[in-house]
């Protein structure tokens, strides 16, 4: 009898612990910020460190408009919900200088790299989910004038039909075809379980629709 | 007297047992240390077949497909230029000393030679570039494998003919191939 009770408690506990939490906005933003490592992937190749971090739409909207009304928030989320967002970073293992400057032999070459990341890198970025490739349709290169030792791009990709953060069935593979540093195709993987466990934001009307 | 003797014998037995136990424990410890050191040493050196590794690496397959696509397109372009040249040769034969046809022929010939030369150089550069990209990633992943497995040396041999003899378990080519391919796809191990 006590064994059965224990088994039932274990099953309930497992179910509860595997489901994502529901959090209010401040806790939600705090959770995403504190758990960045869980919803990102990093890879080191030679002198370079690549990382990609998943950005939930709600988190992006709350970060940009922390004091937005519920109506404004819902409107923004609806507008942005058509894409999957990621932050893509490239840095050097040494962390000493920006990778854009790495190995550059002339100012022309440096400028070409800036132009490449500003305008041309988009077509070299893809997502692969369940063997289907999704293109990068939105790209913003954060120009920091080498004040920080990494390159950062904010990216938006086509979203699979019926995509659900909570019920995602496949890992997300991020693909970058490097044309700058001679590294070839760089692939990073964000595990589906990490995405599934992102909390649900508790905004009454939003939560009821989703 | 007899009592003293039996006590004395009992004492001797206990002492002997103790000494025996200590001896057995020490022998076991020495054997264990010897075995651990021996096994550890024999696992710190491994070799992998670089040719198999290179061929089985997923990035190699992807880049080979890419390069074949480029080479194939270029081959079509060269075919078109050669066909055009042959047409002009036919026209020269038919039209005798027509200057215009001769000039067109010379231009077409030059274009074919220049294009062929340019494509050859570029194709070689592409092959080299792709090889460099493949080895950059392979070297990183093999290094990571060595770090994770706490190995001292990983020998890279070009084909199994280089190894005259190796104890079983030292050739870990297959294991490394699986590892590098998983790492390439983005898995951590």
Image: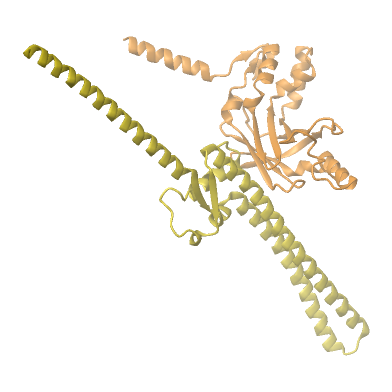
Chain colours: A orange, B yellow
| Number of marks drawn | 0
- Quick one: A179 or A98, which is closer to the camera? A98
What residue occupies the far front of the structure in this picture?
Answer: B1
State whether residue B116 appears in this view: yes
Quarter of the image with the N terminus of chain A is: top left
Q: Give the residue drawn at x 85%, y 40%.
A: A114
Above or below, A143 relative to A24 = below
Q: Position of residue B29 (x, y in %)?
A: 35, 31
Q: Give the residue drawn at x 76%, y 25%.
A: A79
Q: Quadrant location of residue B64?
A: bottom right
Looking at the image, residue B123 sits to the left or right of residue B108; the answer is left
Q: Quadrant location of residue A55?
A: top right
Above or below, B121 relative to A87 = below
Looking at the image, residue B43 sits to the left or right of residue B73; the answer is left
Q: Position of residue B3 (x, y in %)?
A: 8, 12
Q: Position of residue A35 (x, y in %)?
A: 64, 21
Above or below, A51 relative to B57 = above
Quarter of the image with the C terminus of chain A is: top right
- Quick one: A92 or A41, which is closer to the camera? A92
Q: Give the residue drawn at x 73%, y 62%.
A: B123
Q: Position of residue B75 (x, y in %)?
A: 72, 67
Looking at the image, residue B145 sits to the left or right of residue A121; the answer is left
Above or below, B95 relative to B28 = below
- Quick one: B95 or A103, which is closer to the camera? A103
What residue occupies the far bottom of the structure in this picture?
Answer: B96
What residue occupies the far left of the structure in this picture?
Answer: B2
Q: Give the residue drawn at x 75%, y 67%.
A: B120
State whether residue A75 appears in this view: no
Q: Quadrant location of residue A10?
A: top left
């Amino acid at each position: 009898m006590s064994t059965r009770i224990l088994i039932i408690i274990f099953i309930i506990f497992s179910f509860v612990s595997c489901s994502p939490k529901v959090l209010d906005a401040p806790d939600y933003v705090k959770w995403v910020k504190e758990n960045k490592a869980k919803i990102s992937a990093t890879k080191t190749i030679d002198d370079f460190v690549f990382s990609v971090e998943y950005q939930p739409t709600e988190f992006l909207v709350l970060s940009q408009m922390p004091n937005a009304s519920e109506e404004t928030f819902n409107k923004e989320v609806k507008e942005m919900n058509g894409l999957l967002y990621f932050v893509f970073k490239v840095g050097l293992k040494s962390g000493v200088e920006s990778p854009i400057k790495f190995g550059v032999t002339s100012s022309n070459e440096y400028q070409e790299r800036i132009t490449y990341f500003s305008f041309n890198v988009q077509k070299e970025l893809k997502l692969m989910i369940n063997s289907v490739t999704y293109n990068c349709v939105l790209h913003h290169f954060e120009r920091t004038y080498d004040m920080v030792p990494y390159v950062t791009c904010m990216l938006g990709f086509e979203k699979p039909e019926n995509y659900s953060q909570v019920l995602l069935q496949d890992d997300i593979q991020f693909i970058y075809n490097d044309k700058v540093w001679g590294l070839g195709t760089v692939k990073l993987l964000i595990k589906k379980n990490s995405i599934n466990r992102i909390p649900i934001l508790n905004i009454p009307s939003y939560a009821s629709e989703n | 007297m007899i009592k003293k003797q039996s006590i004395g014998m009992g004492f001797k037995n206990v002492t002997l047992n103790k000494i025996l136990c200590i001896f057995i424990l020490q022998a076991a410890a020495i054997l264990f240390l010897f075995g651990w050191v021996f096994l550890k040493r024999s696992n710190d050196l491994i070799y992998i077949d670089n040719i198999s590794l290179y061929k089985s690496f997923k990035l190699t397959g992807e880049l080979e497909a890419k390069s074949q696509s480029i080479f194939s397109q270029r081959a079509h372009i060269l075919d078109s230029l050669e066909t055009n040249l042959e047409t002009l040769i036919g026209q020269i034969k038919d039209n005798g000393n027509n200057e215009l046809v001769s000039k067109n022929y010379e231009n077409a010939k030059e274009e074919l030679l220049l294009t062929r030369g340019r494509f050859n150089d570029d194709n070689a550069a592409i092959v080299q570039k792709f090889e460099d990209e493949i080895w950059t990633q392979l070297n990183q992943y093999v290094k990571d494998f060595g770090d994770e497995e706490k190995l001292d040396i990983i020998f890279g041999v070009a084909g199994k003919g280089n190894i005259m003899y190796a104890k079983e378990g030292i050739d870990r080519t297959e294991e490394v191939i699986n590892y590098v391919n998983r790492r390439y796809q983005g898995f951590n191990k």
